[in-house]
Amino acid sequence: MPASEKKASLNSEELFKKARQVLAGGISHELRYAAPYPQYIARAKGSRMWDVEGKEYVDFGMGSASMLLGHGHPDVVKAIQTQVENGVFHANCHEGEVEWGLLVQGMFPASERIRFVASGTEATLLAIRIARAFSGKSKVLRFETQYNGWHDYVTVGTAEPYNESPSLGLPPEAISSTVVVPTDAARVEDALKKNPDIGTIICEASGASYGTVPLSHQFLRDLRALADKYKCVFILDEVISGFRWSPGGIQALSGVKPDMTTYAKVLTGGLPGGAVGGREEVMQLLDPTVKFKGKQPGVTHKGTFNGNPLVAAGAVAALNIIKTGKPQKHADAMAKKLRDGMQKTLDEHQVAGVVYGESSTFHLYFGKVDQRGLAGLTAAQFKGVPKETVKAFRKGLRTRGADLMSYLGGVTSLAHTDDDIGRMLDIFKSTMQDLIKEGLVGRA
Ligand SMILES: Cc1ncc(COP(=O)(O)O)c(C=O)c1O
């Protein structure tokens, strides 16, 4: 038996018990917690994962949407193996980061210069620091329920009440320097008029939580115009949508040219990392040879693992496939099949609900919509499906062998097949039948 298929000696329940004695909360990311204990995953390959009990899942989480090519694509694995032989990490400049940067720049022409970081959170942290320095204004405008990472300057607004911090531990300045509004151009302009010290606008390109709260391309174009009018730096957060929605992300589809773009997830082929890209004039603030307002460089930025060779090797292998647009075409078709099939099941069972999503994503809204359809829902409503329904739905899928990403949605990949979609649709149908029996969903 290959080492990768070796069964763990402890089951998930036992592992969690042990984890509680060593890891804070027993976990490494708060969304990985599940009651009474999370399933521990032993391995993943293609579109599937196996837990330590040997149970197989069709995976629609795909490494929090980072594995557009599926788990363990042979080209990516080979590139990583080759790099391991040549040194995992040496903290020096190397050819791989140049090749990686050129691939990003080639797909995202608005990113005239790139700086690699170690995660999506670091990407938005750095982008906001550069934006403050460039604009000379301290406040940041962001949008209700959107997620731009977990650092202090993007925490306010992720949950209701939107003008308070959902977390303890933020300095008051970080709270008061964040202005949160709904995704409505008139409300944005109003906030910009009232707060002349807003110098940064950051927006999740897909709409909150990979499109759970959808967003129109027109809104992004409006933001571009408002950022120009009010002299703000416009950061488009493409951590999820970058490379997935198209090789050039949502900016290529919408024609919007942000001042800066934040990247992670697909950027790295599934390894840890991230990047900020932007207009040369803005990114010059990171150039050690350029003086800006008396500082050289204008913005200081370090980070031991930035652009590290192992990640760069995997990323270059992945992006060389992703730049063709073929993986996106396949993953999009799989997601569409899934959305159509799920909606058919809801309709046949007269469940009040809508299955929606762009690109290679799918989302569910359980509830009635009026004649305006999804356009009539607020961000809070999209994310306000009763907790017990969400829990029962996710658990029903898991028990039957399918795993989602977060909340009521997921993503597909190049590795998903018609067989995976058929299996998921069967699992979905029987899970829905349970939810109907338990009275957890409304009727159409
Ligand atoms: C849109 C968006 N921005 C930023 C982040 C933060 O990225 P990371 O988890 O790599 O820190 C995420 C993570 O899910 C995200 O979805």
Image (tube, rainbow, N blue to C red):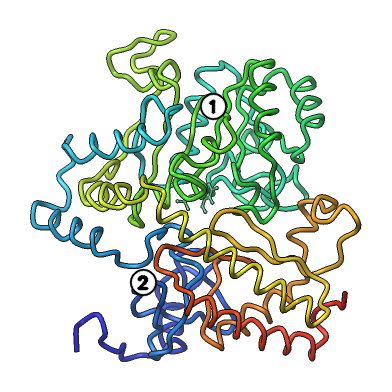
Residue found at the far left of this picture: 86
Q: Secondary structure at mark 1?
A: loop
Dot 1: within a 10 Å radius of its alpha carbon, few (fewer than 14), some, or many (20 or more) residues? many
Tag 2: amino acid: Gly
Q: How many marks?
A: 2
Disc on res. 68:
none
Report x, y in % for residue 180: 72, 38
Is the residue under label 2 in contact with that under label 1 (CB below 8 Å)?
A: no
Residue at disc 2, CB closer than 8 Å to ligand 1: no
The amino acid marked with disc number 1 is: Lys
The reply, left or right, for residue 15 in relation to residue 240 is: left
| Residue receiving disc 2 | 46
Residue at x 54%, y 28% (from the top left corner): 258
Which residue corresponds to the image point at 56% horizontal and 88% vertical from the top-left? 399
Residue to which mark 1 is pinned? 257
Characterize the local packing of mark 2: few (<14), some (14-19) or many (20 or more) Cα atoms within 10 angstroms.
many
Disc 1, ligand 1: is the CB inside 8 Å? no
List x then y, in percent, for residue 126: 45, 33
At which x and y percent is residue 289? 27, 14
Identity of the residue drawn at 47% across and 80% down: 419
Front-lying residue, 41 or 216: 216
Q: Tell me the quarter of the image containing the C terminus.
A: bottom right
First in residue order: circle 1 vs circle 2? 2
Identify the image quadrant of the N terminus.
bottom left
| Picture residue at 47% right of the left edge, 38% below the top | 262
Instruction: Specify the quadrant of the image occupied by residue 173.
Output: top right
* Above/below status of 200 relative to 121: above
